[in-house]
């Protein structure tokens, strides 16, 4: 039986049974992000001090962006880190949803996954373009049982439109903690009207804007220690989680480009390369030869032969002015 036979619909499962509170780490990606997603997942497992259930989110039309064979490889890797593993399909099609030059509409899947979070569970959402480099379980305590928690990102224009007199609440959604009972009571499925009127609402940052319009100033703030974004930072703070938001990604970087990095970009990219090393060790120990060869080939496909894709992408980013070395 293929692992993809385990794609599940959990929308009708009973989540009211009294059990110890579950921890679910939820992720999603499509073909373009498979390799960084794999590095990210293994890094999260490496620095977790308790077992977690691993969920991989799928849109209803996921086969347009990921093959069943690719999903098999995803689930085989998840089997090595998750207490239980599930590929979870949500009631959302991505075909007509917003995309950007570097973000797929698969990002909207997180909204559907939050709706499926059982009331006896805490769900931690992790974007595919981040790595964990230190223990991160403290942020579960910092979530304080609130329905939703995340780290602030500056966006006063959005705040002024969606909340009268309140400020400093707009949140980056690369790392989000959802407590199932609170989410079900306050927010479940209420994001859908915002998504349906995405263009009318003037949204720019995809699922992040949809979620912020829904939650507004009801976010519980988390420390940037758990969502450090070098594109917004001026000093290195030894964070637990480094999130490569924006266009410039470390897996699209050659060793020569790495030597040109300045400021916070150098330790941030080093964090990814260190996570890559941990990933290589993990797949060598935990996966079959066939599975290990697949992820090695994914790295090559992502970067291109001799770093060719990385150089091309580097030039595009510099031309767009999206990244500065100093």
Image (cartoon, rainbow, N blue to C red):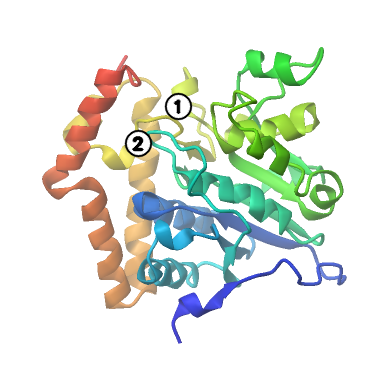
In the image, residue 106 sits, relative to residue 52, either above or below, namely above
Coordinates of residue 155 in the picture (x, y in percent): 62, 18
The residue that label 2 is drawn on is 249
Which of the numbered marks, if any, corresponds to residue 230? 1
- The secondary structure type at the circle numbered 2 is loop
> Toward which corner of the image does residue 261 lie, by quadrant?
top left
Coordinates of residue 318 in the picture (x, y in percent): 26, 21
Neighbour tally class for label 1: few under 14, some 14-19, many 20 plus, Cα within 10 Å: many
Neighbour tally class for label 2: few under 14, some 14-19, many 20 plus, Cα within 10 Å: many
Coordinates of residue 206 in the picture (x, y in percent): 55, 34
Q: Residue at x 86, y 72 (%)?
A: 17
Q: Where does the C terminus fall, quadrant-wise?
A: top left
Task: Name the residue at the left extreme.
Answer: 306
314 vs 72, left or right, is left
- Precedes in sequence: disc 2 or disc 1: 1
In the image, residue 21 sits, relative to residue 85, either above or below, namely above
- The residue closer to the viewer here, 13 or 292, is 13
- The residue closer to the viewer here, 269 or 32, is 32
In the image, residue 91 sits, relative to residue 72, either above or below, namely above
């Amino acid at each position: 039986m293929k692992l993809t036979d385990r794609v599940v619909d959990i929308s009708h499962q009973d989540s009211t049974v009294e059990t110890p509170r579950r921890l679910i780490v939820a992720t999603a990606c499509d073909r373009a992000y498979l390799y960084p997603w794999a590095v990210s997942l293994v890094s999260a497992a490496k620095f977790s001090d308790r077992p977690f259930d691993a969920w991989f989110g799928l849109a209803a039309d996921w086969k347009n962006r990921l093959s069943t064979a690719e999903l098999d490889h995803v689930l085989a890797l998840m089997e090595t880190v998750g207490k239980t593993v599930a590929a979870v399909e949500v009631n959302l099609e991505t075909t007509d949803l917003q995309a950007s030059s570097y973000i797929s509409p698969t990002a909207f899947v997180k909204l559907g996954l939050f709706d499926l979070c059982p009331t006896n569970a805490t769900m931690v959402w992790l974007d595919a373009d981040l790595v964990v480099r230190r223990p991160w379980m403290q942020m579960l305590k910092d979530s304080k049982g609130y329905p939703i928690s995340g780290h602030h990102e500056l966006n006063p224009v959005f705040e002024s439109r969606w909340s009268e007199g309140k400020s400093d609440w707009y949140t980056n959604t690369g790392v989000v903690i959802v407590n199932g009972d609170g989410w079900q009571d306050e927010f479940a499925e209420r994001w859908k009207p915002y998504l349906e009127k995405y263009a009318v609402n003037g949204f720019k940052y995809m699922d992040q804007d949809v979620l912020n319009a829904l939650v507004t100033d009801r976010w519980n703030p988390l420390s940037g220690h758990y969502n450090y974004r070098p594109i917004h930072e001026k000093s290195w703070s030894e964070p637990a989680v480094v999130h490569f938001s924006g266009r410039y990604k470390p897996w699209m970087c050659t060793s020569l480009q790495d030597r040109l990095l300045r400021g916070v970009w150098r330790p941030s990219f080093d964090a990814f390369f260190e996570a890559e090393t941990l990933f290589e060790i993990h797949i060598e120990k935990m996966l079959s030869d066939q599975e290990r060869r697949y992820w090695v080939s994914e790295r090559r496909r992502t970067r291109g032969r001799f770093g060719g894709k990385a150089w091309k992408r580097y030039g595009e980013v510099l031309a767009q002015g999206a990244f500065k070395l100093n």
